[in-house]
Image (spheres, rainbow, N blue to C red):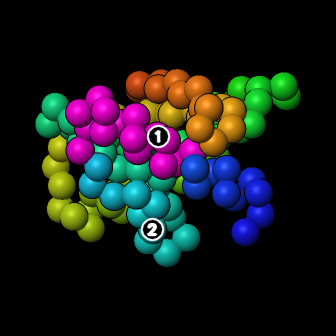
Amino acid sequence: MAKHNELGKEGEKAAIAYLLEHNYVIRHQNWRSGHLELDIIAAKDNMLIVVEVKTRRNTDFAEPEDAVNKTKIRRIVRATDTYLKMFQLDTPVRFDIITVVGNVGNFEIEHLEEAFYPPLFT
């Protein structure tokens, strides 16, 4: 496995640990339906929280959350819609980003709640 893939997996583990420490219930990790994927689906306070995890060794070139662009947001929202229909859920949804920066064992984690809203399709 490529080093950046290993770092990404470790970053997701760190994000899961962070969420559990903050009393989130993890429903799914790396949930897939066809080509759609959601990194983490959690629940807290009667709300479904969809978390996109971005892991980087450093922020020399860009902030990790900058990788969540309009195209990525549309894919996340489409995947979330599929998830809600598949599990027949009727609950409020929040979209968060967790950034994980550094090296394994020495990560800096930032949790951006309500990082984005679903775009209006016209």
Q: What amino acid type should be assigned to the residue bearing mark 1?
A: Ala
User: Where does residue 33 sit, x and y in percent of width and height?
Assistant: 44, 71
Neighbourhood count class around disc 2 (C-alpha, 10 Å): few under 14, some 14–19, many 20 upward: some
Indicate whether residue 72 is drawn in magenta: no
In this view, 113 is above or below 68? above
Q: What are the residue bounds of the magenta stretch?
A: 11-25
- Is residue 70 visible in the rendered structure shown here? no
Quarter of the rendering containing residue 64: top right
Q: Residue at 46%, 55% (x, y): give it.
A: 38
Determine the secondary structure under disc 2: strand
Q: Mark on residue 32?
A: 2
- In the picture, measured across the screen, residue 23 lies left or right of residue 96, that is left
Q: Residue furthest right?
A: 61
Q: What amino acid type should be assigned to the residue bearing mark 2?
A: Arg
Indicate whether residue 24 is drawn in magenta: yes
Q: Earlier in the sequence, mark 1 or mark 2?
A: 1
Q: Mark on residue 108?
A: none
Q: Are marks 1 and 2 in contact (CB under 8 Å)?
A: no
In this view, 70 is above or below 111? below
Q: Residue at 77%, 63% (x, y): give it.
A: 2
Q: Residue at 16%, 31% (x, y): give it.
A: 45
